[in-house]
Amino acid sequence: MLLTLLLCVFVFFTVHYLSRRNARGPLPPGPPGLPLLGNALQVPLEHPWLTFTRWAQQYGDVMHVNVMGRSFVILSSLKAIDDLLEKRGAIYSDRPITPMAGELAGFGQYIPMLPYGPRHREGRKLILGAVNPRNLPYLQEVQEEMITLFIARLAEDPSNFALHIRFLIGSTVVRITHGVTVDQYDDPIIEAMENVMDTFTKLSAPGAYLVDSFSSLMHIPDWLPGAGFKKVAKAAQAETLRIEDKLCNIVKEQVACGTAPPSFIGDLLQNHPDSTPEEEEVYKKIGLISYTVSAIESFLILIAQNPDIQRKVQAEIDVVTGRTRPPTASDRSDLPYLDAVLKEVLRHMPAGPLSLPHKVRQDDHYAGYLIPAGATVLPNTWAIMRDPTLYPNPEVVDPERYLHNSDKNINPDPRSFAFGYGRRVCPGQTLAERTLYLTAANILASFDVSDAVSLDGSKPKWGGRIISKPLPFNCTIKPRTKAL
């Protein structure tokens, strides 16, 4: 009886809501769904961007998807993204509430997931201040030092390239953010940070948890049957807070002893000795930066599968370095072909095929359709990177597409799309790009890469729900005939 009553109330309010929304204008077209569930069963957990791209070919570049009453608007063209997220950024810069990952597990307090407002703006300002040109020499010094160690370890044990890459990224991040030097692969700090990022990816996957569709489930008692998701979220939050506090306490001790090396957090604490607990909390959330090895692994696969491209990059590097020294950050402007290859890596297999979601703050109208207030807006970066009107023959790996290109409307720089849109562009973009460049340049200066295959011997494959990354694969990495 109670269930019937609740169902009737739900149907009444749903009909009332839909009738009011229809009076404000029609929603964008989209795939038909089921009663109550909408399109929930049609959106796959793995590779949702492929499904969205296929639907866009039928329903258009501005498409509406209903997941259990929640509105999702998928943008699958550069024009739509530019018109809304860039030109109307004031109302499209918010983030939707994500009950599982954001609220229960606490990831909603980090800069990428924060609602648009004073705390988000202050966090971005602090990050951009840390990566400004004044600090560039030190940042490059750290990155080059870590790359040198990476190349030495890769030469010693090339079969464990994936382990070396993860260590390179993790150790560079904690060195820059907290001034902490990590030497061992199994360092608990590196392991904890990798676990945090893996957990975030799992918890924030669309459709993975029912609470993301029915936010009221956040408030049910922990002891009720079916409330196991709350235990998962609490464990994730506890692990994140533990590594946050551990890293911050290390920096505080160094600052107190006068031994703190330059770092994001160390500099903030020294420059703001009277910071409030609330300000320190912002510093902690800045310090635990998200990172991924996806682009570097995708680079290895691309050059292994395209030996002609690999040889051209190596020839360019050899001219610049004379094969007497490793490539450095200052060589970047003299390596245009390598730059084009890295653009193609970001385009051909983007680590973020769906950019982090935006939320529209008020009713908006576009192309004759209503985009309702509170709707989650998903920029489909994959669709842009594979748009043949932007990138002719998009399935073909072709670095030449970016060279001698007089028509800027064809083959635009994919870096404009790979790091987010509007007021939510990743503030750490320059660091990520430089790490990718230094890693790629030094690998090809020292090694030949070939025979990239999945563990079962087939072609490499990519998996993912939010971050797309190569599934485990093997490749052959051999020193070039004349070592540096």
Image (cartoon, rainbow, N blue to C red):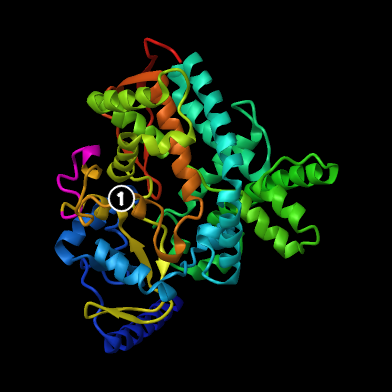
Residue 108 in the image: above or below residue 406: below
Position of 84 with respect to 175 (left or right) is left
In the image, residue 393 lies in the stretch drawn in magenta: yes
Q: Please provide percent x and percent y for residue 393.
A: 15, 44
Position of 59 with respect to 447 (left or right) is left
Residue 266 visible at all: yes
* Numbered range of the magenta stretch: 389-400
Residue 167 visible at all: no
Q: Please provide percent x and percent y for residue 251.
A: 74, 44
Disc 1 marks a residue whose amino acid type is Asp
In the image, residue 126 lies in the stretch drawn in magenta: no
Residue 393 in the image: above or below residue 5: above
Picture quadrant of residue 144: top right
Q: Residue at x 78, y 47 (%)?
A: 252
Q: Please provide percent x and percent y for residue 200.
A: 51, 50
Residue extending farthest right = 257
Q: Residue at x 71, y 50 (%)?
A: 267
- Magenta: main secondary structure equals loop
Identify the residue position indicated by label 1 in the image: 413
Position of 93 with respect to 281 (left or right) is left
Q: Quadrant of the N terminus?
A: bottom left
Q: Secondary structure at mark 1?
A: loop
Q: Please provide percent x and percent y for residue 107.
A: 56, 57
Q: Residue at x 47, y 66 (%)?
A: 95
Residue 74 in the image: above or below residue 448: below
Residue extending farthest top = 481
Between residue 2 and residue 82, name the one nearer to us: 82
Position of 376 with respect to 215 (left or right) is left
